[in-house]
Image (cartoon, rainbow, N blue to C red):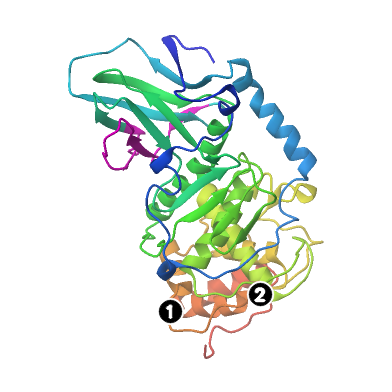
């Protein structure tokens, strides 16, 4: 990548060439930023079976190899890049800078909520980078270890946590630091960025995060794309919609009063309503995280390649109808929330209304189907009962009433 400014490439301390494109274990900074999951915060031991969701392994391997090429070209020992218009050094007692990362399209963006700790023999305590990626350490820090972990999630690979070591040689402004584009750490940053985006979107829509009590253990690259207990396994760092779907499982498990279905499922076929509900609501959360609610062609890019792109405004006619199908369920949930009116969809419920209706502690039985979820939405927004019925009908749901005991 070309810069008008000078570029100083910093080498990793205490590493080998084999570590440059792989995660490194970073002592006390690794593994959840010192914020362990407790038994009191544990969520259900659910396992999803999402083999129909992501591309075949052969395709993933090809994509991964292509993404690694630039990182390999710059040299095995190079993991950090420092970009600054000029070298700024002072005799101040603080060293500051910003941690950024290349997104999948090569655009440099802030890397927020990354744990960082000083490793100079003294205990400084772990902090998090700011919304703009900013960090601030003592000038005599010696080195900083950045780790892709915080109180809400942690990322690990085959060699441990995804982390970088940055040497500090004095006070002043260090400029912008990024993991090397194309490296394993750089790709893992995409997952971290998506999770930060999830936090920001939920809070931006008015949903607080007080229910997110348990740190989600995330493995990439994993053996498949699935959620088990409180752990995510992901195969493609660039697959924003697939990763959002798996994150959706983890978030709905913590936030919602719901039941999960088990067993393999295919996105265009009929199966158990509980499976369709738990899969459909996970896709709905993925859409909330990454898709503009005003989009007139809301769709997923990587999910289920044989049917991609998966369109949510216009579900194909050959897809199984009703609440036994996750695509239809997800589309119905999206139509409750989105602001784009199509056909008979004239409703746009605030996300907090939907979230609260389905949340733990709602006093109802656990949601085991879209029909259960629909009845709760009707009680939460009775003034829009007719519009909600029309949304269900448009999405082939055979629901006719919004009353009934739960």
Q: Residue 235: horizontal and vertical position, in percent? A: 66, 45
Q: Which mark, by number, is residue 274?
A: 2
Classify residue 335 as left or right of residue 39.
right
- Please tell me which residue is depicted at 39% across the width and 39% down the height of the picture: 112
347 vs 292, nearest the viewer: 292
- Can residue 104 be found in the magenta stretch? no
Instruction: Assign a secondary structure to mark 2.
Output: helix
Q: Which mark, by number, is residue 161?
A: none
Camera sees residue 81? yes
Give the residue furthest to the front: 121
Give the total of numbered labels.
Answer: 2
- Relative to 148, does residue 34 appear above or below in the rendering? below
Label 1, residues with CA under 10 Å away: few <14, some 14-19, many ≥20: few
Classify residue 314 as left or right of residue 24.
right
Q: Which mark, by number, is residue 362?
A: 1
Label 2, residues with CA under 10 Å away: few <14, some 14-19, many ≥20: many
The quadrant of the image that shows the N terminus is: top right
Question: Of helix, strand and loop, which mostly describes the magenta segment?
Answer: loop
Q: Residue 263: horizontal and vertical position, in percent? A: 73, 68
66 vs 13, nearest the viewer: 13
Give the magenta-colored segment's residue range: 107-134
Instruction: Assign a secondary structure to mark 1.
Output: loop
Mark 2 or mark 1, earlier in chain: 2
Q: In which quarter of the image is residue 171?
A: top left
Q: Quadrant of residue 8?
A: top left
Q: Residue 26: horizontal and vertical position, in percent? A: 44, 37
- Can residue 126 be found in the magenta stretch? yes
Camera sees residue 347? no
Marks 2/1: CA–CA distance:
19 Å
Give the residue furthest to the bottom: 405
């Amino acid at each position: 990548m070309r810069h008008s400014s000078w570029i100083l490439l910093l080498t990793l301390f205490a590493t080998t060439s084999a570590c440059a494109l792989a995660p490194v274990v970073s002592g006390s900074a690794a593994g959840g930023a010192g914020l362990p999951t407790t038994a009191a915060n544990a969520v259900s031991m659910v396992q999803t079976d999402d083999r129909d969701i992501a591309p075949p392994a052969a395709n993933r391997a090809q994509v991964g190899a292509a993404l690694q090429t630039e990182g390999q070209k710059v040299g095995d020992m190079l993991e950090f890049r420092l970009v600054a218009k000029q070298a700024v050094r002072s005799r101040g007692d603080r060293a500051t800078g910003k941690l950024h990362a290349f997104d999948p399209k090569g655009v440099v963006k802030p890397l927020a909520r990354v744990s960082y700790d000083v490793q100079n023999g003294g205990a400084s305590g772990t902090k998090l980078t700011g919304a703009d990626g900013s960090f601030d350490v003592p000038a005599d820090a010696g080195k900083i270890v950045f780790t892709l972990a915080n109180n809400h999630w942690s990322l690990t690979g085959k060699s441990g946590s995804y982390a970088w070591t940055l040497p500090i040689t004095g006070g002043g402004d260090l400029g912008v630091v990024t993991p090397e584009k194309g490296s394993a750490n750089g790709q893992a940053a995409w997952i971290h960025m998506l999770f930060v985006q999830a936090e920001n979107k939920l809070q931006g829509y008015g949903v607080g995060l007080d229910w997110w009590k348990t740190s989600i253990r995330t493995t990439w690259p994993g053996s498949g794309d699935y959620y088990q207990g409180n752990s995510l396994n992901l195969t493609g760092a660039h697959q924003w919609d697939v990763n959002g779907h798996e994150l959706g499982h983890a978030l709905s498990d913590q936030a919602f009063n719901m039941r999960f279905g088990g067993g393999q499922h295919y996105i265009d076929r009929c199966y158990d309503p509980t499976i369709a509900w738990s899969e459909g609501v996970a896709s709905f959360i993925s859409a909330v995280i990454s898709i503009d609610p005003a989009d007139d062609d809301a769709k997923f890019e990587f999910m289920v390649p044989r049917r991609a792109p998966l369109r949510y405004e216009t579900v194909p006619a050959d897809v199984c109808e009703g609440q036994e199908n996750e695509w239809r369920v997800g589309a119905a949930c999206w139509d409750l929330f989105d602001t784009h009116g199509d056909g008979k969809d004239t409703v746009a419920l605030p996300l907090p209304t939907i979230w609260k209706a389905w949340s733990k502690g709602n006093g109802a039985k656990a949601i085991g189907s879209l029909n259960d979820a629909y009845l709760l939405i009707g009680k939460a927004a009775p003034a829009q009962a007719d519009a909600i019925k029309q949304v269900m009908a448009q999405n082939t749901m055979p629901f006719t009433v919004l009353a009934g005991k739960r």
